[in-house]
Image: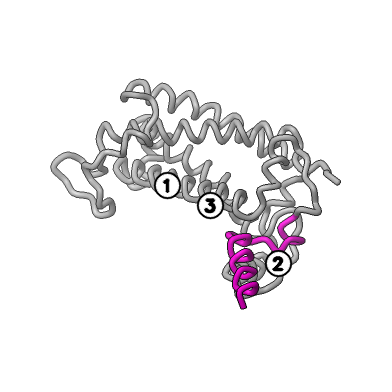
């Protein structure tokens, strides 16, 4: 029997954030392509091996520099307002308790990794989210805040000189902004992969809010590629 899992406000802010983040990343990469390196002209930079190589066009958004900047800053304000509204809501609604890591979550994360690696047979007990999910969902808002802070340091390096200097100067502020973006992309990609590979039934919950607890990964002992490995094992047993 389906139960309510996600409040409508959480669902709306989730999808607004997803759209804003995709456009911000694509437009940011288009802006980066205007000068696809971090070192100032005539200088070198230690930590980026792809200097001078533009990001593939398919990964960018905005068409050209000015267009990308317009999209980037428009989505930035939407991203900030949406993020603040989300944080306030989960605090007032009490949903922060499902996301904040607690004592024992490091141990439980290790158990989840063992389960996903087929070392542990049974799915560890979990609440609404398992320990690895909690760390991911807790880290994303922090990274989002860092993206905004480092972005402001790049956007207003003179007006916000103390902030830019705190980042190590304009070159490093731009670099940290790029790394935060990369971290957000990686975590988002892992999140999407795990949804489809482990708990595709949760897609319904982030659209309609409804979730069938009988389909929970813990009850199904679900892990990435579970069905592929299960089918292969059954085929081997049938041939034996």
Contact (CB < 8 A) between labels 2 and 3?
A: no
Residue 156, by quadrant, is top left
Contact (CB < 8 A) between labels 3 and 1?
A: no
Instruction: Where is residue 115? Give x, y as percent.
Output: 63, 69
- Earlier in the chain: of badge 3 and badge 1, it is 1
- Earlier in the chain: of badge 2 and badge 1, it is 2
Secondary element at image label 1: helix
Instruction: Where is residue 139? Give x, y as percent.
Output: 57, 51
Residue tagged 2: 123
Q: Residue furthest bottom?
A: 240
- Earlier in the chain: of badge 2 and badge 3, it is 2
Residue tagged 1: 182
- Counting other residues with Cα less than 10 Å from the Cα at mark 1, is it few (<14), some (14-19), or many (20 or more)? few
Secondary element at image label 2: loop
Whether residue 9 appears in magenta in the rendering, the answer is no
- Determine the main secondary structure of the stretch shown in magenta: helix
């Amino acid at each position: 029997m389906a139960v309510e899992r996600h409040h409508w406000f959480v669902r709306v802010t989730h999808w607004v954030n997803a759209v804003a983040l995709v456009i911000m990343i694509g437009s940011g990469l288009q802006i980066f392509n205007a000068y696809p390196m971090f070192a100032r002209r005539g200088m070198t930079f230690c930590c980026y091996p792809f200097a001078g190589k533009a990001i593939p066009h398919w990964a960018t958004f905005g068409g050209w520099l000015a267009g990308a900047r317009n999209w980037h800053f428009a989505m930035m304000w939407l991203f900030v307002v949406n993020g603040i509204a989300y944080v306030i809501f989960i605090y007032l609604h009490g949903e922060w308790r499902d996301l904040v890591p607690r004592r024992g979550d490091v141990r439980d994360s290790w158990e989840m990794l063992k389960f996903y690696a087929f070392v542990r047979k049974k799915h560890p007990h979990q609440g609404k989210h398992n320990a690895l999910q909690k760390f991911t969902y807790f880290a994303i808002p922090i990274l989002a805040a860092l993206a905004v802070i480092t972005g402001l340091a790049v956007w207003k390096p003179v007006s916000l000189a103390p902030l830019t200097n705190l980042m190590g100067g304009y070159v490093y502020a731009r670099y940290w902004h790029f790394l935060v973006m990369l971290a957000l992309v990686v975590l988002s990609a892992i999140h999407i992969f795990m949804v489809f590979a482990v708990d595709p039934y949760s897609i319904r919950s982030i659209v309609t809010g409804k979730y069938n607890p009988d389909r929970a990964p813990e009850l199904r002992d679900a892990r990435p590629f579970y069905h592929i490995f299960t089918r292969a094992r059954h085929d081997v047993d049938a041939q034996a």
